[in-house]
Image (cartoon, rainbow, N blue to C red):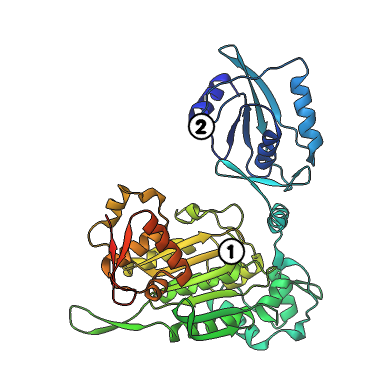
Amino acid sequence: MTKEELLQLLQTGENERVEFKKSFDAKTLIAINAMANTTGGWVIVGVADNGLILGVTLTGETLQNWTNEIKQKTEPSVFPRVQQFADQGKNIVVFQVVEVPIKPISLQGRYYIRKSNSNHLLNTGEIVDQRLQSMNLSFDTFDVNAKFNDLNKEAITLFSYKTKETGRFTPSASLENDFIKLGFAKKNKLFRGSELLFGYHHTSIHIGRFKTADTIIDDTIISLPLVLAVEEAMQFIKKNIRLEYEFDGELSRKNKWQFPLPVIRELLLNAIIHKDYRNPTDIIIKIFDNSIVFSNPGGLYGNLTVEDLETDIYQPRHRNRLLAEAFYLMGEVEKYGTGYIRIRSWLHDYPKLEYEVENMGDFTRVYLRQKVVNGDKLGERLGDKLGDKLGDNQKLILEAIQNNPKISLSQLSSLIGISQTAVENNISKLKSFGLLKRTGSSKRGNWEVLL
């Protein structure tokens, strides 16, 4: 690095690959560990968070002592490149960190990665995920005790039919040879993915039709081989959403589902393929009057972010490679990270619908819901009064109330897809902000948005 390049980094500011430190301390070590476990970068010591050069005091052995401390406290040891610069009579030290090939490395028994411009402590599951990714493995590629005779014949028949139909794989007369060729087994050993796809396992898809967040109209638990579970789940969902009608210019009637079935299918397959099957919790799908919510054990995988999913160039990350491969061969999904691109395309024909992805660490939640109509630019007025402090659900509540001042708590719960208790908590916050009040009785009164 040249001095000019250093000054350019100081001007650009902190990001995923650059962090400023006033002095060399424990947080400096954490930043170095996090960058080594992510994409590498530069930790610059002697600089304030805003890029102002403060300088550090150096003696003849300072840099060597710092390097030794990094080496001794990381396992395997990290050896960053160290450079010293002077500007305006002040010393600056730059540690250039290279991404390690086998992750994660530890810092005194803890593991960190870099997210945006901050450092994140990994939990046990994330540590395992990092190790699997760095070794090009996935959870569904480990041996299980299941035998070929244990597999569901109907699931295998459906898989063979669909792969032959797509032309992506032509089955032979030997199931065992086919599975070895596809990487679903080795010799006499089946992999976890094969058991999940074609066998009997302890994981389910739990789907419920709700009138309100705590009123269930219908529900089912699907505990089939995953190849069969998709159609079973789709049938239940279709039974519990509306089939509507539209008339074109020639007054002919056209059927139209309340929610586009390709979008529902894509979200269902995403949940199945990206579930963390180490977690015994079911995939949970909640169907409300105006929304569907998919809750899936396992956060976004491989440093993928919600912001990445909004682009057309995000790189796919597969927590379960065999599941992704099987559904690709069947023509159900693509392997090129185009799922959310296709979802946005399909929703062009449904301008009144929107979707939202929420990454909750150990869970991923996706909402597909009807937009709340904003007839008089409520969002613009919110920007002038606490708009930045409001969560998305609070804004949706205000918009819903603006459209229907008599709307009930249970209706809000169903519309937004959160519990009635969560609605009440958000309403309390809106009242404290001075944005909402109730006039009249609890049963016959109205809501009033104060803007």
Whole-angstrom CA distance, mark 1 to mark 2, is 31 Å
Location of residue 115 in the rendering, given as x and y in whole percent from the top left corner: 58, 46
Q: Residue furthest front?
A: 441
Location of residue 42 in the rendering, given as x and y in whole percent from the top left corner: 62, 32
Which quadrant of the view contains residue 424? bottom left
Q: Secondary structure at mark 2?
A: loop
* Residue at 54 percent of width and 68 percent of height: 270
Camera-nearest residue between 193 and 387: 387
Quadrant in which the C terminus is drawn: bottom left
Say if residue 393 shows up in the picture: no
Q: Is residue 156 left or right of residue 212?
A: right
Residue where numbered disc 2 is placed? 13
CB atoms of marks 1 and 2 within 8 Å = no
Camera-nearest residue between 89 and 71: 89
Q: Is residue 195 left or right of residue 363?
A: right
Which quadrant of the view contains residue 92? top right
Q: Is residue 143 left or right of residue 326?
A: right
Which quadrant of the view contains residue 187? bottom right
Location of residue 334 in the rendering, given as x and y in whole percent from the top left corner: 53, 66
Residue where numbered disc 1 is placed? 363
The amino acid marked with disc number 1 is Phe
Location of residue 240 in the rendering, given as x and y in whole percent from the top left corner: 43, 84
Camera-nearest residue between 404 and 350: 404
